[in-house]
Amino acid sequence: MDCGVILNQLLTKIGGSRIDDEPGWGNFGDPRVVEFLLKYGKEFPTEGLECLKETRFPDHQKSLDPGNCHKNCLELRCYVRTGRSEYRLVHGWALSDAGTWYCHSWCIKTTGPENITETTHPRIAYFGFVVPDEINPLAIWIFPSSLGDLLENWRKRFGALGEFALDGWDARRSTGTAVIPSALLDRYQLLYQFRVIFLLQPVHLLVVLVHFA
């Protein structure tokens, strides 16, 4: 897979003239991350965009770095004082005024519309994928990154059910404080939607919980 050619074709259809030079691709030099973007990525509208200059948590207020979107988003995503994160992390590309797409991260709220929370300065267009809650968010920032491995394993583990989670089907995501893993709650709820929940008798459910704990 020629990551540069694929990314350039994908993104310039939305707008702009080119993507950033290869040293700036970050995780998207890994074909597995590009494949994940192709499958789960989407354009995020700029209407309702909120640009933060500092965190707004009552007991954790600090200025955000205007030159480090990935670290800023970790600050928002990893704050769990309330027992769950208020934000989900989105990793992808953003279009500058000059017509160039740059590797970028931003956030959306865990509930409500998927309005962009920008932590540096607003861009013209955004295209990316919601980072699954089961993925260690540090993988978008630390290099060399394990994000490709993590996303590949996530796809193997959750398969089609993962699409419901990334589409915001269950906004009650936890950050690890729940007794039952959120991915398992997704599976349980999906079975209920199709009226086959009777297959999960209490003893069977207990076995499943132990397996995924």
Image: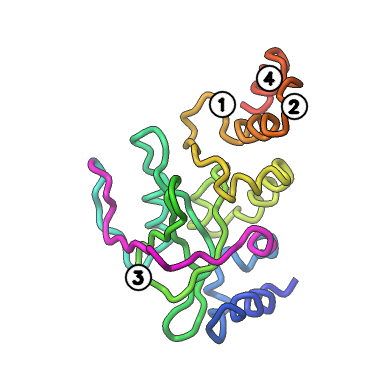
State which tag comes first along the sequence, 4 or 3. Answer: 3
Residue linked to disc 4: 205
Mark 2 to mark 4: distance in Å?
A: 13 Å
Task: Determine if the magenta segment contains residue 185.
Answer: no
Q: Earlier in the sequence, mark 1 or mark 4?
A: 1
Q: Where's residue 69, x and y in %? A: 40, 63
In what element is the residue under mark 1? loop
Say if 43 sits above or below 187 in the image: below
Disc 4 on helix, strand or loop? helix
Residue 18 location (% of width, % of height): 56, 84
Please tell me which residue lies in front, 134 or 203.
203
Identify the mark at residue 121; answer none if there is no mark.
3
Q: Quadrant of the N terminus?
A: bottom right
Disc 4 residue type (three-letter): Leu
Q: Residues within 10 Å of mark 1 (few under 14, many from 20)?
A: some
Other-residue count near label 2 (Cα within 10 Å), few / some / many at <14 / 14–19 / ≥20: few
Residue displayed at 48% across by 66% down: 45
Circle 2 is placed at which residue position? 196
Q: Is disc 3 surrounded by few (<14), some (14 to 19) or many (20+) residues within 10 Å?
A: few
* Residue at point 45%, 46% (across, down): 110
- Give the labeled residue for mark 1: 180
Q: Nearer the viewer, mark 2 or mark 4?
A: 2
| Residue at the far top in the pictured view | 203
User: Which mark is drawn over residue 79?
Assistant: none
N-terminal label among 1 and 3? 3
State the CA–CA distance, disc 1 to disc 3.
38 Å
